[in-house]
């Protein structure tokens, strides 16, 4: 039985997501084949993050947050399993996932609003990573919801640039007892 999808407020639109953790051989073209599979089938990828896995250069971990509305989860997993370089696929139920994302934003500041921006940074648990006379760059490594909230809080300020990495996730060590 497939886990219940995440029903969250993402970019102000309720979207249903599944989190797939895919272990692949770290070879040229693997990511292109995965992206091509999604494109050919019309599956929507909400977020994608890739990095070498578990200290072994031989494998990479691909975290794919999939729009479950675009295709049944079983079909997505079945298509991924057909790719030769895919070693393992884990479907992580959102209630059993530890999810994190990185948000970097450069915001214009002046004497009037600098204190308010610093207050937002502190209340969100973010950090200032770069400063000049007219702007500052902040960073938040947190849950997707915390990044969403900080992004909404910054809307009233002139943003020079904002970037989010997309989610990475691992299963919780202690599983939720809810079904």
Image: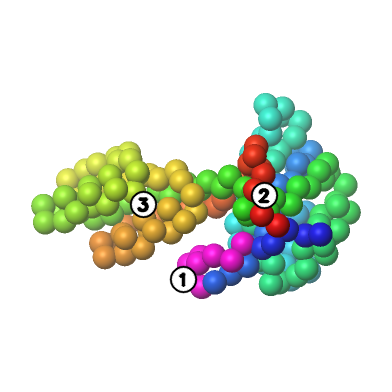
Instruction: Considering the whole magenta stretch, tell me its main secondary structure.
Output: strand
Quadrant location of the N terminus in the rendered image? bottom right
Mark 3 and mark 1 lie on one chain; the one further toward the N terminus is 1
Tell me the SS state at disc 1. loop
Which residue position holds label 1?
A: 12
- Residue at 69%, 67% in the rendered image: 68
Q: What stretch is highlighted in magenta?
A: 6-13
Residue 40 quadrant:
bottom right
- Observer able to see residue 86: yes
| Circle 3: element type | strand
Around disc 2, counting alpha carbons within 10 Å, would you say few (fewer than 14), some (14 to 19), or many (20 or more)? Answer: few
Label 2: which residue?
Answer: 177
Please identify, in this view, whether the residue under mark 1 or under mark 2 is nearer the observer: 2
Q: Which residue is denoted by mark 3 in the rendering?
A: 105
Q: Nearer the viewer, residue 1 or 126?
A: 1
In the drawing, does residue 133 fall left or right of residue 1?
left
CA–CA distance in space, label 3 to label 2: 37 Å
Vertical arrangement, residue 170 with respect to residue 160, above or below: above
Tell me the crowding category of disc 3: few under 14, some 14 to 19, or many 20 or more residues within 10 angstroms, Cα based.
Answer: many
Task: Pinpoint residue 113: horizontal percent, then vertical percent.
Answer: 16, 56
Task: Give residue 67's position: percent from left, percent from top.
Answer: 66, 66
């Amino acid at each position: 039985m497939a886990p219940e999808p995440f029903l969250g407020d993402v970019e102000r639109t309720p979207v249903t997501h599944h989190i797939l953790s895919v272990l692949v051989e770290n070879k040229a073209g693997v990511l292109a084949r995965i992206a091509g599979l999604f494109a050919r089938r019309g599956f929507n990828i909400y977020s994608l993050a890739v990095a070498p896995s578990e200290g072994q250069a031989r494998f990479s971990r691909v975290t794919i947050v999939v729009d479950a509305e675009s295709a049944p989860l079983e079909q997505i997993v079945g298509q991924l399993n057909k790719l030769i370089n895919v070693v393992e696929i884990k479907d992580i139920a959102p209630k059993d996932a530890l999810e994190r994302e990185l948000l970097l934003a450069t915001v214009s500041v002046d004497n009037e609003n600098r204190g308010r921006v610093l207050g937002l940074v502190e209340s969100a648990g973010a950090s200032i990573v770069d400063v000049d006379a007219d702007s500052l760059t902040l960073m938040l490594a947190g849950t997707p919801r915390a990044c969403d909230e900080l992004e909404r809080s910054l809307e009233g300020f002139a943003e020079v640039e904002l970037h989010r990495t997309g989610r990475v996730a691992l299963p919780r060590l202690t599983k939720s007892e809810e079904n």
